Every structure is written in C-alpha cells, then in structure tokens.
Image (tube, rainbow, N blue to C red):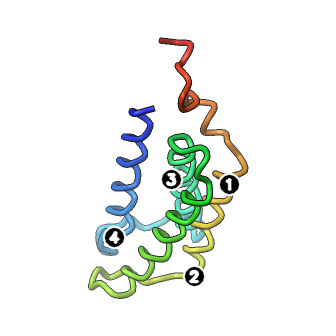
Amino acid sequence: MKHIRLLAWAWTLLLVFLLLLPGTDLPEAPWSWTDKLVHVVSFYLFGSLWLQTYPHRRLHVLLAGIILALGSETLQALLPIHRSAEVWDVVADMAGLVLSLHVPVFSLFLPKSGKKSSRQ
C-alpha cells in the first residue's frame, strides 16, 4: 500500500505541475475536445489512486479533487502563465472524479489496500 500512496502523491504533484504549466509550453491539441478528455483521464487517475490508498475516505478524496480542480483553474486565471480558467475544465475534472468513484477499473491493476498481493 505504501507504493500506491507514493504513486498517488507523485501523480498529484505531476498533475499540479501540468495544470500550472505556462500556456506557451503546451502543445496544440489536435481536436477541440482533446483538452477535456485529458482533464477527465487525469482526474480519474487522481481519484483512483487516492481511493486505492484510502478506500474508506471517498468523501475526502472527492473534496480533495474538487479543491484541486477549482484551485488550479483559479490559479490559471490569476497567475501570469498565459492560461485561462474554463468552467468546462472543472466539469471535465468532476466527471473524472465521479468516474473514479463509480468505475473502479484502475483497481484491477493494483492490489487492494490492506491485503497482500498474491504475486508476492
């Protein structure tokens, strides 16, 4: 479980870094909806990793994801990084979080927390 928590922290830090990366450093998206898909997948992974680490703290994971989504969009609007806050980015982030609560596909690839993997 410790390695999953480390992976959750690493993903969270990488996500914050990417969300606050200057807009001039971002590649051009091939389709208009690509950005929203990246938000959904990113927050799905965020939720899935933290839920794998703390399975009985669903509300805490959801609240942390909401704070991250709203905080990153607020900072994009306030910081001089050539990024703009978008309501649809927050909607996509929330969709990823909700998916992580209801579609535990990611947990198929990780051992359940508190239980030893049969591969050890």
Name the residue that disc number 2 marks: 87
Residue found at the far bottom of this picture: 78
**Amino acid type indicated by mark 4:** Leu
Identify the secondary structure beneath mark 1. helix
Name the residue that disc number 4 marks: 20
In the image, residue 76 sits, relative to residue 99, either above or below, namely: below
**Amino acid type indicated by mark 1:** Leu
Name the residue that disc number 3 marks: 46
Q: CA distance from mark 3 to mark 2?
A: 19 Å
Query: Which residue is drawn at the image coordinates 42% and 74% (left, top)?
Result: 72
Q: Is residue 30 visible?
A: no
Q: Residues within 10 Å of mark 2 (few under 14, many from 20)?
A: few
Q: Position of residue 29 (x, y in %)?
A: 48, 66
**Amino acid type indicated by mark 3:** Phe
Name the residue that disc number 1 marks: 99
Q: Quadrant of residue 112?
A: top right
Which tag, 1 or 3, sits closer to the chain's start? 3
Query: Which residue is drawn at the image coordinates 53% and 63% (left, top)?
Result: 39
Which tag, 3 or 4, sits closer to the chain's start? 4
Task: Using the image as rendered, state which of residue 35 and residue 111 is in the foreground.
Answer: 111
Which tag, 1 or 4, sits closer to the chain's start? 4
